[in-house]
Amino acid sequence: MKAKKIFIYLAIAIIVVAIALLVACTLLRSAKPAAADTADDARLSRLVFNADSAFAYCARQCAFGPRTMNSAAHDACGEWIKSTFESFGLTVKSQRATLTGYDGTALRCENIGAFYRPELPRRILLCAHWDSRPWADNDPDAANHKTPILGANDGASGVAVLLELARMLAADSIGADVGVDFVCFDAEDYGTPQWADEPDDVDTWALGAQYWSERYARAAADKRPEYEFGILLDMVGGEGARFFKEGISERFGSQIIKRVWSAARQAGYGSFFVGESGAYVSDDHVPVNEVAGVKCIDIIAHYPDCPQSSFGPTWHTVDDTMEHISPATLKAVGQTLARLLAEY
């Protein structure tokens, strides 16, 4: 009987030791991810998108004047955009073509591509348009309807965010282990004006993106990058801007939207990225999705309560100037995308 009791005590002791070892191993396993999470949180806390820098890039584009097709200001700004990307050490290539406007005008188009770590097979596409509208055809004053707009928000703001993200990547302040292709589309805003005799045709817009998408689709699979996804930025610097889930983006890239909107919340800018569906917008992302076959969403401002336009009060007016550009809006978009890239 005594031996039996000793055996029972030994069995209990073995079980207790086993449980203790199991608990210890569990604690050790959980400690490693906690340390990794702490390090990752510290890295993300140092991730700062410089809104003042983006604001300056926006102002620099506007300093050339309206970047309308075939103008000297357009060509000079294009050279500046290329040289700025190059100053960050990115590989820059131009895609030139003569395209035809709605009215038969021959347009000297130049899509500007800048490539961060082109040797990496995993790639993300970030894009915006860099031309500006030749006509303020939505201006409250009809006398301005044929006046070129400066396009501080409608064009320059998107490129400004791309440039600051490129600077951050080149400085390794994001820590992304993925290649990024920046594409500045041309001839987006030469679409049929409201005062034209003929009806508006969606195919007269986004001419540069149409050309890029057609060439991408025709290229052999081993001669073109395979993008995990794309993000288009359009009108991302306006005062009071909010970003709803654009309809075409939801159709083609609902998972991308989830990731971007989640990154916005994590970055502290969930109030800018509204968790509701917005309008369907014909923009550069349409041919990128439908022709190139690259899943691409559009981050574009939506003002549902603005009587002048759902794109905001300065859209296609002479008031689309730097006075109405908000560093807070640039920060919200830029910080969100920096956070997203940092996940790679």
Image (spheres, rainbow, N blue to C red):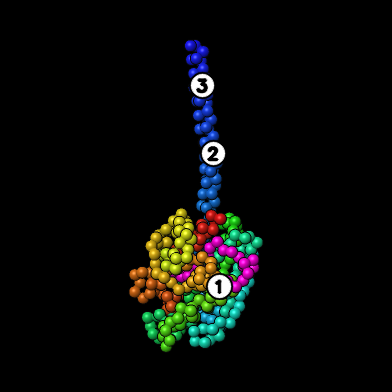
Q: CA distance from mark 2 to mark 1?
A: 48 Å
The label shown at residue 295 is none
Q: Separation of disc 1 and disc 3 at Cα? A: 72 Å
What mark, if any, has residue 213 been given in the picture?
1
Q: Above or below — where is 18 with respect to 28?
A: above
Q: What residue do we see at 59% from left, 59% from top?
A: 122
- Going from N to C along the chain, the mark reached first, 1 or 3, is 3
Image quadrant containing the C terminus: bottom right
Residue at position x 50%, y 71% in the image: 290
Residue 236 image offset from top left, x and y in percent? 46, 68
Does residue 190 belong to the magenta stretch?
A: no
Task: Check disc 2 and report its element: helix, strand or loop.
Answer: helix
Disc 3 target residue: 11
Front-lying residue, 9 or 51: 9
Q: How many marks?
A: 3
Mark 1 is on which residue type? Ser
Instruction: Name the residue beneath numbered marker 2.
Output: 29
In-front residue for pair 248/91: 248
Task: Say which label, 3 or 2, has the lower sequence index.
Answer: 3
**Residue 70 is drawn in which quadrant?**
bottom right
Residue range highlighted in magenta:
217-238
Given this view, does label 1 or label 3 mark the residue nearer the observer? 3
Give the quadrant of residue 172: bottom right
296 above or below 149? above
* Residue 226 point in image, percent of width and height: 59, 64
Q: Please, what is the three-letter code of the amino acid marked with disc 3? A: Ala
Q: Earlier in the sequence, mark 2 or mark 1?
A: 2
At x 55%, y 85%, the residue is 106
Indicate the secondary structure of the residue bearing disc 3.
Answer: helix
At 52% from the left edge and 80% from the top edge, which residue is drawn? 68
Give residue 40's position: percent from left, percent from top: 54, 49
One can see residue 331 in this view: no
